[in-house]
Image (cartoon, rainbow, N blue to C red):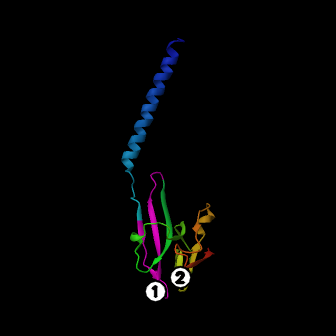
Amino acid sequence: MKVVLPWLVRALAIVGLCGLSLVGVFFVLSRGWPVIPDESHFGPPIVSPAGTHKAIVISHEGDGWLSRYCYKSVVVLAADVSPEQDRSGDAAVFEGPCDNFSPSGARVEASPRVEWMSSDGLLISFSIQTTVMRASTVKLRKQDESGSIRVRFGVRD
């Protein structure tokens, strides 16, 4: 009996691991890889008063396999440069979770809100509604990549 027991335990462990592996493979294949492809949606450009720069809100969405993700970024570019042409990737002055501001009447406004205060000053207001349930990471830069645009931030519910 002492000789049979270790072999029986090993055999059952192997059968169990094979069964779990098959369930895992079935789960991955039935779910797809990934279900939602990674996508970036570019908002309309918000041109500075002098027409030299533009700010663009970009929504990034996808299926991180086990959990979906969504975040938004704001890039500041020269007026004649498209987001696809920006190869450095350093044009982002804001990155934060997809969120909305608290409803005001029947209207719900998406966060972030971007507005030019002057030809070289940009104001980005963003919501902290999602922080009610969990902490969120936000990345901020106080000037654009060229150093010619000052960026200010406002936090709202």
* Secondary structure found at label 2: strand
Residue 96, percent across and down?
A: 55, 67
Specify whether 153 is left or right of 4: right
Reply yes or no: does residue 44 show up in magenta. Answer: yes
Residue 48, placed above or below residue 90: below
Q: Nearer the viewer, mark 1 or mark 2?
A: 1
Residue 51 is labelled as: 1
The quarter of the displayed image where residue 18 is located: top left
Is residue 102 in view from this perspective? no
Residue 83 is labelled as: none
Extreme-bottom residue of the structure: 50
Residue at 48% across, 27% down:
13
Q: Write the start and end of the magenta stretch as one range.
A: 40-66
Residue at 40% across, 37% down:
22
- Amino acid type, callout 1: Gly
Residue with the mark numbered 2: 115
Residue 52, percent across and down?
A: 46, 84
Name which of mark 1 and mark 2 comes first in the sequence. 1
Alpha-carbon span between mark 1 and mark 2: 14 Å
Closer to the camera in the image, 82 or 37: 82
Q: For mark 2, does the 10 Å Cα neighbourhood hold few (<14), some (14 to 19), or many (20 or more) residues?
A: some
Q: For mark 1, does the 10 Å Cα neighbourhood hold few (<14), some (14 to 19), or many (20 or more) residues?
A: few
Residue 48, percent across and down?
A: 49, 84
Is residue 135 in view from this perspective? yes
- Amino acid type, callout 2: Glu
